[in-house]
Amino acid sequence: MGFFSKIAEGLKKTRDSMMGKVDVLLNSFTKVDEELFEELEETLIMADVGTVTATHICEELRRRVKEQGIADGAGVRVLMQEIISEMLSGNEELDFSTSPSILLVIGVNGVGKTTTIGKLANNLKKDGKKVLLAAADTFRAAAIDQLEVWAQRADVDLVKHNEGADPAAVVYDAIHAGIARKADVIICDTAGRLHNKKNLMDELSKISRVIDKEAPDCARETLLVLDATTGQNALNQAKQFKEAAGLTGIILTKLDGTARGGVVIGIKEELNIPIKYIGVGEQIDDLRPFHSDEFVRALFGEEEM
């Protein structure tokens, strides 16, 4: 299955839920008036776009409809697609400007963090990059074991310590191993326990200090893995992690299993954190780099260009 087809298939539930309702609404109005905008805003909120973002979309729609003299639902739909595409675009590429580049991956248990790292490692290896994984989520033995399985599947190197070890020490060893082995990318699996934000901040601060000292000139990303099926809860998690950790990007998993993919728009708009990758299936190659134009075309049910 082609790249765009896979994304379009993965977004089917969200497209049916969100754009299906939007299309019914736009087709039911004979004129573009305030009542239409109010109902459209409500429809977007129900589709997990979020109140702030839904309001912004509709305010921008009102302005452009008036400016361009749009008088029918089809014209409103075109403008809405333009607005959402603009909202989602920008800074989608990961920074691999140095060798090694370092990716810190965080997220609460259950969002598919370790699996996502394995898929990302596989993805980057296919792109010709030499990848090394650091099992710095030492809080759970299962996380270390699971990452080891993924390292084997993706055929990449792994640096690990025992359960309960200092995560910063794992990252220290991974940086030195990565430099010695001429790795292009070091991906660090870190614990993402939000129930005690201070512990999380202290742990990530210590890891950051190690990276600053041992790899001061390396490109670095801090990526938060979120589960799309949790809808607005994913947005709330992103707010908390942004506060605690300073994020450079989001990886949104399980988009294929939910009608709540509208949360992508809210995360980018409200928090100004770019979406870097999306998960659209169970297979090892179902983690896809995020491209806003493709995502929006698939969301609006358009064909591949």
Image (spheres, rainbow, N blue to C red):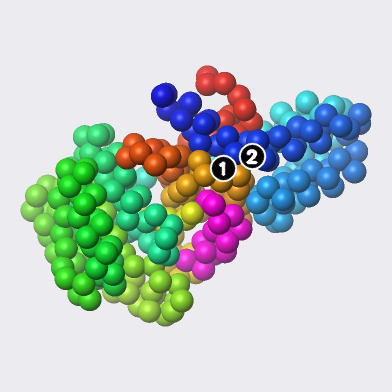
Name the residue beneath numbered marker 1.
88
Name the residue beneath numbered marker 2.
84
What residue range appears in magenta? 228-241
Kind of element beneath mark 2: helix
Residue 116: x percent and y percent? 35, 50
Left or right: residue 90 versus residue 69 is left
Give me the residue at 23% from left, 39% from top: 125
Kind of element beneath mark 1: helix
Relative vertical location of residue 197 with respect to residue 216 in this rendering, above or below: below
Residue 296: x percent and y percent? 58, 34
Give me the residue at 52% from left, 44% from top: 257
Give me the residue at 56% from left, 42% from top: 88
Could you tell me the amino acid type at mark 1?
Leu
The answer to whether marks 1 and 2 mark residues whose Cβ atoms lie closer than 8 Å is: yes
Quadrant holding the N terminus: top left
Residue 214, disc: none
Could you tell me the amino acid type at mark 2?
Ile
Q: Does the rendering let one see residue 72? A: yes
Left or right: residue 86 versus residue 201 is right
Residue 82: x percent and y percent? 66, 33
